[in-house]
């Protein structure tokens, strides 16, 4: 029964959606997409595609029986473009054929005529043109206008951060299977089975109970399947609906890269004011978010940027503005960190700008402004259990920041073309969906009469190990070996109204629901013992190590025999539980509240070495103090910290998303889009954990903490470590704040204003 994901993966035995055996007469779909970034369709000719052998049908928006609408937060996005398309790669028609290759080839036979319309790719231009999504948000505290007068130094600049492709190994895929009575089963690679269910129901004009979504596991997601698995599921469902046959739709890597959204690029302005003692008195920031063509999750992502505008710092006077700007690019979407990294890069740039101009070390300014317990964030939440200070000081002391600085300085003095750089990066990331209503989960636990256990929750296993964590919760409560417990697939008929597995909350929410269901079962079981043992109800009974104890003494009743007896005694061996994170609220009218269950904190010290002749660098070490609380699975958590860090290094230094003048993605293949590989991994990654708090019921399960996203942002430090190395080589280098900091950019900055 040991079928844990990790074991199956290494043996190549784990099943993904694409591995499923399909019914004999299944069909295959492929999507015809827009050939330009903005246009008015004048003619769409599908006749030639239809004549190709093996082609069964071609569907356009006219074939949609329900709503041609997939926008959830803001209903602005058609499933299939009607008269206008607004980004390169937008789905216009779906071709269904008897095999996948034919479906893809037939797409090329569709003829589209259109009149080109003007495109906007730059968020600031979109803003000026009034192309905004939702409303402008302003988070503020204190009074920045007044505070500037009290500042001894004021600096301002702009900051650019780029997009990032999720590059999940498994591309978007969905299988739609018609069932009796006009019902459909959708097997999808989604982080959000309920969103798939809702979208498919709306598009087909059916009710939710006519759609069942099944998710086995995902080959990665990183946010890319939080909202953007829906459309592909809906296209497969539309085809299955029209044809009455099973239809599979799997995107080629090329279509996936071109048509799905990325991390949002941001263009931002900051103004920072400090007093002589390096205290940040005032901070103003404006985020121009490049949202792409449609709303998707952009407004929520912007909201998280607003929450993280001040990262780990206490600043008494803040004004943060944010605008979602509509452009003619693929709709950008959730990506690990969800707007947090973009915002934190801006405040860290502001601090670096000040440090550089004042000729102090950035870490002096950082340290002088770290938030302390009792202080509050601009959105009103108190930093009560915040470990910002603890993590920073532990990192600085245990990793010896001062000696390290000395060593780097000495090295730089003694080397002319090889330079080292050092940076410290604190992170403070709020845990909970910022949309309060999403912070809910449920679990359904069955104990079968042989003593084995089945658990269903809304959690999606996508390689992050949530199943293993949930299994540990149940094993712990029943005190039985983990191999008694099976974590089932995620299915909307077993678990309803599921929030996406996102916002790092998968284990917290679903683990807590599982804990509650198991605890109520355990209580029921313990109460059933005296009758089975035919013994005194006043005695103390326990279930421990797969056996029953009476007054602390081992009885000869084993777990298995006990469960069989409980079944025969007609004890209810199933439980359902519901968990909603307590204490959350947020008032958008005043932009204040308590949006997070807690914050995850940490501090990283990053050291790099630059080859200043070639403009290349390597990461020598990243040393992190990271708060995982009382970890449920330390090996999994370590993997999350390392993976997030390296994914972030990709975003900061190499992953460049460029579009042609026509709005066509330039690097749309695995051979041209560069992500981190084994050579990008720091020579050394050290991770220490601060002491966990006792009795923290508000955290994740059993005092554990969310781990998926927070460590991504340690990577931001790499940029500032590189700037330090560059300035050691070329004090005249002109500093600008723009990532990805590719080797080309690094090279140019190294050589700027020099005689090389
Ligand atoms: N998704 C979401 C998220 O809908 N709300 C969030 O706050 C969030 N945060 C991180 C990642 N995904
Ligand atoms: Mo996400 S960015 O799907 O937690």
Image (spheres, helix red, strand yellow):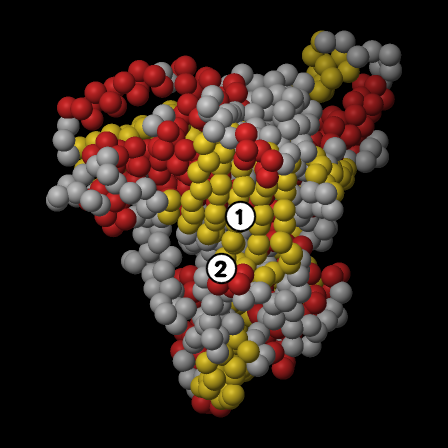
Where in the figure is residue 213, as x and y percent of width and height?
Answer: 64, 57
Q: Residue furthest right?
A: 537
Residue 148, disc: none
Residue 259 visible in the shown view: no
Relative to 197, 358 lies left or right: left
Badge 2 element: helix
- Up-down: is 1 above or below 79? above
Badge 1 element: strand
Distance from the alpha carbon under mark 2 to that under mark 1 = 12 Å
- Up-down: is 568 above or below 54? above
- Up-down: is 643 above or below 399? below
Where in the figure is residue 746, as x and y percent of width and height?
Answer: 26, 45
Q: Residue at x 81, y 36 (%)?
A: 572
Residue 286, disc: 1
Relative to 115, 477 lies left or right: right
Relative to 720, 452 lies left or right: right
The residue under label 2 is 123
Q: Residue at x 34, y 64 (%)?
A: 666
* Among the 4 quarters of the image, the one containing residue 415: top left
Relative to 323, 169 lies left or right: left
Where in the figure is residue 286, as x and y percent of width and height?
Answer: 53, 48
Q: Residue furthest front?
A: 149
Q: Residue at x 70, y 74 (%)?
A: 66
Count all numbered tags in the image, as a single digit.
2
Residue 201 visible in the shown view: yes
- Of residues 347 and 648, which is closer to you in this image? 347
- Label 1 Cα crowd, 10 Å radius (few <14 / some 14-19 / many 20+): many
Q: Residue at x 46, y 52 (%)?
A: 267
Nearer mark to the viewer, of 2 and 1: 1
């Amino acid at each position: 029964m040991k079928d844990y994901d990790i074991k199956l993966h290494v043996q190549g035995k784990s099943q993904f959606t694409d591995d499923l055996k399909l019914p004999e007469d299944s069909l295959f779909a492929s999507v015809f997409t827009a050939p330009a970034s903005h246009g008015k369709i004048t003619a769409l000719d599908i006749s030639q595609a239809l004549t190709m052998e093996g082609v069964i049908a071609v569907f356009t928006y006219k074939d949609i029986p329900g709503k041609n609408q997939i926008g959830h937060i803001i209903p602005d996005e058609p499933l299939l473009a009607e008269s206008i398309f607004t980004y390169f790669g937008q789905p216009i028609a779906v071709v269904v054929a008897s095999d996948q290759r034919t479906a893809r080839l037939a797409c090329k036979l569709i003829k589209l005529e259109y009149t080109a319309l003007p495109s906007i790719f730059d968020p600031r231009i979109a803003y000026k043109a009034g192309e905004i999504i939702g409303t402008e948000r302003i988070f503020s505290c204190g009074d920045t206008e007044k505070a500037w007068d009290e500042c001894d130094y004021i600096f301002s600049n702009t900051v650019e951060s780029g997009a990032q492709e999720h590059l999940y190994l498994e591309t978007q895929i969905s299988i739609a299977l018609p069932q009796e009575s006009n019902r459909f089963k959708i097997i999808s690679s989604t982080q959000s089975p309920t969103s798939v269910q809702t979208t498919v129901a709306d598009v087909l004009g059916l009710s939710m109970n006519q759609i069942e979504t099944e998710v086995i596991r995902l080959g990665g997601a990183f946010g890319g399947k939080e909202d953007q698995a829906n459309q592909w599921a809906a296209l497969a469902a539309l085809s299955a609906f029209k044809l009455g046959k099973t239809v599979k739709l799997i995107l080629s890597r090329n279509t996936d890269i071109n048509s799905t959204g990325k991390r949002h690029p941001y263009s931002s302005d900051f103004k920072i004011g400090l007093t002589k003692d390096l205290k940040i008195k005032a901070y103003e920031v404006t985020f121009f978010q490049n949202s792409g063509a449609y709303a998707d999750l952009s407004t929520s992502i912007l909201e998280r940027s607003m929450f993280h505008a001040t990262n780990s710092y206490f600043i008494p006077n803040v004004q943060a503005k944010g605008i979602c700007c509509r452009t003619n690019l693929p709709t950008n979407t959730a990506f690990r960190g969800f707007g947090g990294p973009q915002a934190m890069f801006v405040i860290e740039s502001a601090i670096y700008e000040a440090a550089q101009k004042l000729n102090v070390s950035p870490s002096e300014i950082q340290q002088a402004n770290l938030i302390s317990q009792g202080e509050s964030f601009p959105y009103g939440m108190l930093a009560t259990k915040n470990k910002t200070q603890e993590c920073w000081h532990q990192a600085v002391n245990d990793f010896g920041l001062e000696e390290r600085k000395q060593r780097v300085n000495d090295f730089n003095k003694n080397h002319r073309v090889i330079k080292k750089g050092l940076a410290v990066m604190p992170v403070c990331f709020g845990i909970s969906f910022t949309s309060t209503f999403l912070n809910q989960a449920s679990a359904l636990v069955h104990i079968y009469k042989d003593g084995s256990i089945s658990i269903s929750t809304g959690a999606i296993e996508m390689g992050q190990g949530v199943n293993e964590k949930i299994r540990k919760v149940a094993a712990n409560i029943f005190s039985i070996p983990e191999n008694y417990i099976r974590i089932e697939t995620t299915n909307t008929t077993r678990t309803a109204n599921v929030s996406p597995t996102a916002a790092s909350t998968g284990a917290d929410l679903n683990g807590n629901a599982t804990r509650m269901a198991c605890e109520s079962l355990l209580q029921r079981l313990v109460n059933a013992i005296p009758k089975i043992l035919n013994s005194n109800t006043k005695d103390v009974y326990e279930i421990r190590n797969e056996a029953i104890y009476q007054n602390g003494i081992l009885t000869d009743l084993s777990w298995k025999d006990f469960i069989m007896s409980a079944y025969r005694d007609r004890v209810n061996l199933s439980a359902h539980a519901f968990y909603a994170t307590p204490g959350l609220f947020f008032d958008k009218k005043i932009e204040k509240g308590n949006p997070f269950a807690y914050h995850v904190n940490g501090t990283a010290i990053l050291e790099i070495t630059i080859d200043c002749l070639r403009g290349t660098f390597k990461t020598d070490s990243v040393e992190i103090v990271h708060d995982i609380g009382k970890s449920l699975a330390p090996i999994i958590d370590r993997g999350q910290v390392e993976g997030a860090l390296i994914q972030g290094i990709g975003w900061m230094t190499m992953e460049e998303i460029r579009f042609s003048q026509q709005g066509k993605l330039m690097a749309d293949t695995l051979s041209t889009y560069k992500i981190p590989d084994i050579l990008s991994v720091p020579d050394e990654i050290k991770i220490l954990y601060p002491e966990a708090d006792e009795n923290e019921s508000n955290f994740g399960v059993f005092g554990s903490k969310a781990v998926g996203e927070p460590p991504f942002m340690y990577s931001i430090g790499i940029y500032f470590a590189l700037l330090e190395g560059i300035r050691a080589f070329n004090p005249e280098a002109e500093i600008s704040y723009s990532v990805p900091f590719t080797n080309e950019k690094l090279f140019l900055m190294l050589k700027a204003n020099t005689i090389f």
